[in-house]
Amino acid sequence: MHYVLCLVGLMMSCAFAHASEYAAPRGPDGEHPDLNGIWQVMNEANYDIERHMARAAMQLREGPHGLVPAVGVLKMGAVGAVPPGQGVVEGGSIPYTPEGLAKKQENQANWLNRDPEINCYLPGVPRATYMPQPFQIFQGENSMFIAYQYAGAVREIYLEDPGPAPVDSWMGQSYGYWEGDTLVVEVTGLLDQSWLDRSGNHHSDQMKVTERYTPTGSDHLRYEATIEDPTTFTRPWKISMPIYRRMEENAQLMDFRCVEFVEELMYGEWRRNPLPR
């Protein structure tokens, strides 16, 4: 057994060393790594960025003896169920303030009414990265742009510091620079309405996200995002995950016109003749 554990440890050490020694092909400027491509995560972070077990899609309501599942929610079955996930939060849990945690729990109990994803609002950062749909990085000689399949979200990454964001927005303002082979992106000016996942994890308009994209292989990036928000959290904290290149033939972003799918949900009550339920 000791021999097997040593062998496994040696193999993991070699793998980490290989990743750290990887030299990515140079991009259009001839100096920095080429991040061009279509990428996607393979995890359950969009459901819940913290470690979690599988659970039904629950929304709670006040019953005579406390909170109970809302009528009809359990009929969603496996379609709305949450798959288990190991979590992407380094250290295990989000360091909420007491007030921040209380709001998170309230959000989670009412996620079917509150989650911005359900209404097709733009996902914000960092959630856009781990939505269960691909995104594409466009890297030019002096420019950087990211397009997301979900809801047509986009981000221009300024490579010269633009100063404070003039207004808050769903996707915020992104300022990028290189530290060796790592693209660092500082994101500010984010609206406080966006969530970090479907489990009600939230933030204020004071949040700053510092992303790091590091090539670890020809078809892999390591993604890290440090989150700072003294209004909601007691200290900065980090999420991390691998991102994988989409390898199928003719890989491309396709249309996902999200708003068209939720028009009835959002505006149906104002129909002159409501649809039968």
Image: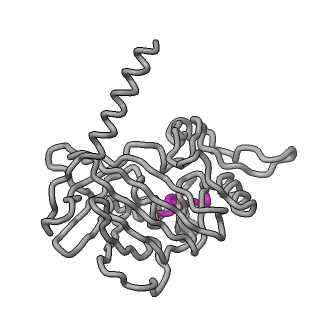
State the residue at coordinates (59%, 43%): 57
Check residue 115 for magenta coloring: yes
Query: Residue 199: horizontal and vertical position, in percent?
Result: 59, 51
Q: Which residue in the rendered view is the most extreme toward the right?
A: 64
Q: Locate residue 95 relative to residue 32 in the image: left or right.
A: right
State the residue at coordinates (60%, 57%): 201
Q: Locate residue 241 relative to residue 116 in the image: left or right.
A: left
Check residue 63 for magenta coloring: no
Query: Residue 80: horizontal and vertical position, in percent?
Result: 53, 43
Q: Could you tell me what secondary structure mostly forms the magenta stretch?
A: loop
Query: Residue 155: horizontal and vertical position, in percent?
Result: 34, 71
State the residue at coordinates (38%, 63%): 151
Foreground of the two, 136 or 207: 207
- Give residue 236's quadrant in the image: bottom right
274 to 175, vertically: above or below: above
State the residue at coordinates (33%, 61%): 148
What colour-coding does the image apply?
A: one colour
The number of discs equals 0
254 to 270, vertically: above or below: above
Q: Locate residue 142 relative to residue 183 in the image: left or right.
A: left
Image: magenta residue range: 113-120
Query: Residue 107: horizontal and vertical position, in percent?
Result: 66, 58
190 to 68, vertically: above or below: below
